[in-house]
Image (cartoon, rainbow, N blue to C red):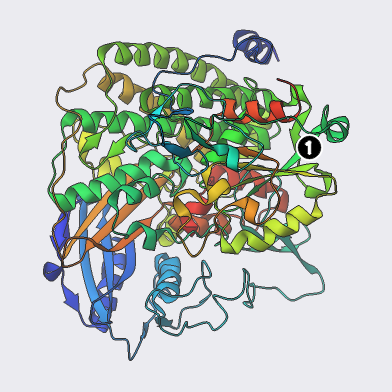
């Protein structure tokens, strides 16, 4: 018992102050929101894999989640429109308690891992009333990762149908948003919003936990 | 014919045996001291399927490669599995990918439910039209007192999908069948596409938690086929990233094991500490999983003196924290009572199944690519193999703890003496009609990538083997005779990859 208390004392409180204080700065090599080089260039944040040698320059800004698929396509003329809050009715229902069911549909476990990280003490997602639950029947919405493989298509639809209305759908990662690097595979689909309506798109490969948290908080009108 | 880790061999130099001879040789060698490292098919321009077997003699650090041809008009051979359990999944994969029947295979079911790669009739007739589990039976026990428990594909946590079918008598598990394939993305044919840049990105997403392991293996295959020698500095940086990946995952696993044993303090601390290592990868590579670091020819990000110092001082601090928290975990009687004697696999069974990685080492199997088939940095800096003695959940946890300590030592050693040199050299074209192979000790165990080029130096076939491919059967086997409530704990102690298996 003493040992547990001693370790507890040594570990201290690690939960970040964000969103009350500024989010922790990310390292300079971190590849966040792309920088548009010139007129006429356009980048689809829902398609790219944020690789360092793709010819795209990246900023250090993790905020990238949007409410609409077309908002992810940015250019000099079209700046990124970050996600909007749910409507008042939905906010009344979900604003202070949002239960989500995660469905991995071909995800490589990078997106899944970095969603899981939000439950660690540093991020402590439950302080916002957001929680991942075990059953779609207990959920207010689903979070989908992966390029939605042929073999997961049916299980995904069943999970969606098992979630009671009203519900929200969140697509996390390039694969779920557009099929990503798997979009040409006959075993995968070309994006979640062609299958079910999506309320929040969180791009990245995988999205940094800050990108995901930022998107969730915007959706709940907490930012 | 001998093959080296990271080496290449002309296709015409690979011995081609008659099917019976091939079968006999593989069985003989594997019943002596070798192990089936890989067994896969590749389509020849004339429509034949060439089966390759790669046998490993871990103690002598030797890989042997041999092949045989299966003609399209008689797509059948005598199954190896009935005499060699290690071949079980490999043969099911061959049957599915190439529509070749391993006659006498004891449990010939599809693995991933896709149509075959040579446009012939599938050996199962409903494969491409039904979703899993199709119309195939699960192994079943018939008795009034027995019952069946089905779990998945969508699980309770934030994890990947798979279906588990338990045959139980009361609480006791008589048999567990694991049905995967839900994550199948068709990655092998995509990897063999004409655009190497895309294949590179794909390799980083074979299993996102093993991005470094798989992308390193891919780069080494291309480097072996192009004859490109990367600098010692690039090798060192890859090794740093691979060990950081191992640290993050092993520590995460220890946290998850504590959680499933019902001890929450360590799961919270380890969960956070895992993030520390992911953040180190982020500062090094710009991605928390190390995507974007390795490219054929070297690495894209350097570690300068300041970063090396910074990494060293952080790692020293993390090492202290780790010792503290793991002491807490490994001295709790309630935790040890849950860990000990659960899901035990004996050395004999581990050998027979062909376990690799920490799961194999927990059963005293001395398998570690870093030592047995050392390449790159591991030729100069040795990491001793961490062995467990008991083959149970406790041993699998203990091996991870030891490996964390040893990885940290290794990192502190190489970060303080990074070799000089360019971090990247441009590789030339790939040799035509050649096979290149690479093995990497990922955090789950032995990763092997094999690339085979066609007559114009593009990929004709790309074969990926994730360590989970060897170990899923081990998990199923470990559950026999255990209580069903032990499954989550035992599952965590293996923590295998779904997408690494499903490809």
Tell me the residue at 32%/28% (across/down). Answer: B240
In this picture, residue A137 sits left or right of residue A53: right
Q: Is residue B82 above or below residue A168?
A: below
Residue under circle 1?
A99
In this picture, residue B118 sits left or right of residue B362: left
Q: Quadrant of residue B102?
A: bottom left
Q: Is residue B11 visible?
A: yes
Q: Quadrant of the C terminus of chain A?
A: top right
Report in which chain the residue with disc 1 lies: A
Tell me the residue at 62%/68% (across/down). Answer: B132
Q: Quadrant of residue B146?
A: bottom right
Mark 1 packing: few (<14 Cα in 10 Å), some, or many (20+)? some
Q: Nearer the viewer, residue B406 or B123?
A: B123
On the image, the x and y values in percent for residue B87 come to 40, 68
Tell me the residue at 21%/69% (across/down). Answer: B66
Q: Quadrant of the N terminus of chain A?
A: top right
């Amino acid at each position: 018992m003493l040992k547990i208390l001693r370790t507890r004392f040594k570990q201290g409180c690690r939960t970040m102050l964000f969103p009350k204080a500024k989010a922790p700065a990310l390292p300079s090599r971190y590849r966040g929101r792309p920088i548009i080089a010139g007129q006429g260039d356009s980048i689809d944040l829902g398609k790219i894999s944020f690789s360092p040698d793709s010819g795209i320059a990246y900023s250090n800004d993790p905020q990238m989640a949007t409410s609409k698929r077309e908002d992810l396509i940015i250019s000099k003329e079209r700046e990124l429109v970050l996600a909007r809050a749910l409507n008042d009715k939905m906010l009344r229902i979900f604003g202070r308690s949002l239960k989500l069911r995660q469905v991995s549909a071909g995800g490589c476990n990078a997106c899944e891992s970095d969603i899981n990280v939000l439950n660690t003490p540093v991020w402590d997602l439950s302080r916002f009333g957001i929680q991942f639950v075990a059953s779609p029947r207990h959920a207010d919405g689903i979070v989908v990762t992966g390029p939605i493989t042929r073999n997961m298509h049916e299980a995904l639809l069943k999970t969606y149908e098992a979630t009671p209305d009203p519900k929200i759908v969140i697509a996390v990662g390039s694969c779920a948003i557009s099929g990503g690097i798997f979009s040409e595979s006959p075993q995968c689909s070309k994006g979640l919003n062609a299958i079910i309506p999506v309320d929040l798109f969180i791009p990245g490969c995988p999205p940094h936990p800050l990108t995901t948290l930022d998107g969730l908080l915007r959706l709940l009108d907490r930012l | 014919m001998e093959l080296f880790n990271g080496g290449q061999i002309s296709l015409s130099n690979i011995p081609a045996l008659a099917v019976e001879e091939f079968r006999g040789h593989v069985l003989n060698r594997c019943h002596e001291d070798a192990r089936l490292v890989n067994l896969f098919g590749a389509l020849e321009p004339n429509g034949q399927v060439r089966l390759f077997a790669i046998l490993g003699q871990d103690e002598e650090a030797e890989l042997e490669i041999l092949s045989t041809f299966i003609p399209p008009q008689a797509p059948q051979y005598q199954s190896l599995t009935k005499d060699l359990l290690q071949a079980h999944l490999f043969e099911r994969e061959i049957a599915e990918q190439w529509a070749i029947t391993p006659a006498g295979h004891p449990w010939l079911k599809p693995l991933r439910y896709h149509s075959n790669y040579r446009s012939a009739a599938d050996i199962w007739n409903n494969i491409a039209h039904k979703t899993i589990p199709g119309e195939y039976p699960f192994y079943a026990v018939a008795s009034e007192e027995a019952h069946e428990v089905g779990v998945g594909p969508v699980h309770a946590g934030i994890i990947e999908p798979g279906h588990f079918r338990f045959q139980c008598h009361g609480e006791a598990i008589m048999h567990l069948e694991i049905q995967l394939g839900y994550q199948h993305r068709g990655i092998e044919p995509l990897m063999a596409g004409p655009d190497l840049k895309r294949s590179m990105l794909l390799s980083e997403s074979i299993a996102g938690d093993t991005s470094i392991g798989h992308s390193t293996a891919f780069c080494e295959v291309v480097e072996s086929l192009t004859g490109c020698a990367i600098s010692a500095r690039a090798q060192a940086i890859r090794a740093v990233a691979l060990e950081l990946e191992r640290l993050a995952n092993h520590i995460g696993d220890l946290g998850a094991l504590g959680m499933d044993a019902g001890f929450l303090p360590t799961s919270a601390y380890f969960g956070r500490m895992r993030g520390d290592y992911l953040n180190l990868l982020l500062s090094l590579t710009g991605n928390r999983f190390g995507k974007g670091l390795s490219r054929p020819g070297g690495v894209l990000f350097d570690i300068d003196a300041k970063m090396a110092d910074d990494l060293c001082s952080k790692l020293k601090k993390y090492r202290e924290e780790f010792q503290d928290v793991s002491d807490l975990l490994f001295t709790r009687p309630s935790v040890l009572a849950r860990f000990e004697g659960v899901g035990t696999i004996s050395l004999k069974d581990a050998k027979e199944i062909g376990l690799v990685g920490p799961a194999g080492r927990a059963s005293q199997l001395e398998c570690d690519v870093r030592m047995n088939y050392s390449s790159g940095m591991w030729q100069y800096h040795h990491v001793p193999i961490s062995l467990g003695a008991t083959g149970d959940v406790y041993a699998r946890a203990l091996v991870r703890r030891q490996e964390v300590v040893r990885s940290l030592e290794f990192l502190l050693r190489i970060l303080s003496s990074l070799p000089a040199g360019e971090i990247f050299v441009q590789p030339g074209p790939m040799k035509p009609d050649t096979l290149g192979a690479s093995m990497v000790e990922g955090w789950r165990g032995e990763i092997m990538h094999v690339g085979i080029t066609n007559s114009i130096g593009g990929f004709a076939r790309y074969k990926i083997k994730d360590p989970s491919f060897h170990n899923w059967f081990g998990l199923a086997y470990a559950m026999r005779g255990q209580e069903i409530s032990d499954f989550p704990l035992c599952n965590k102690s293996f923590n295998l990859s779904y997408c690494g298996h499903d490809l």
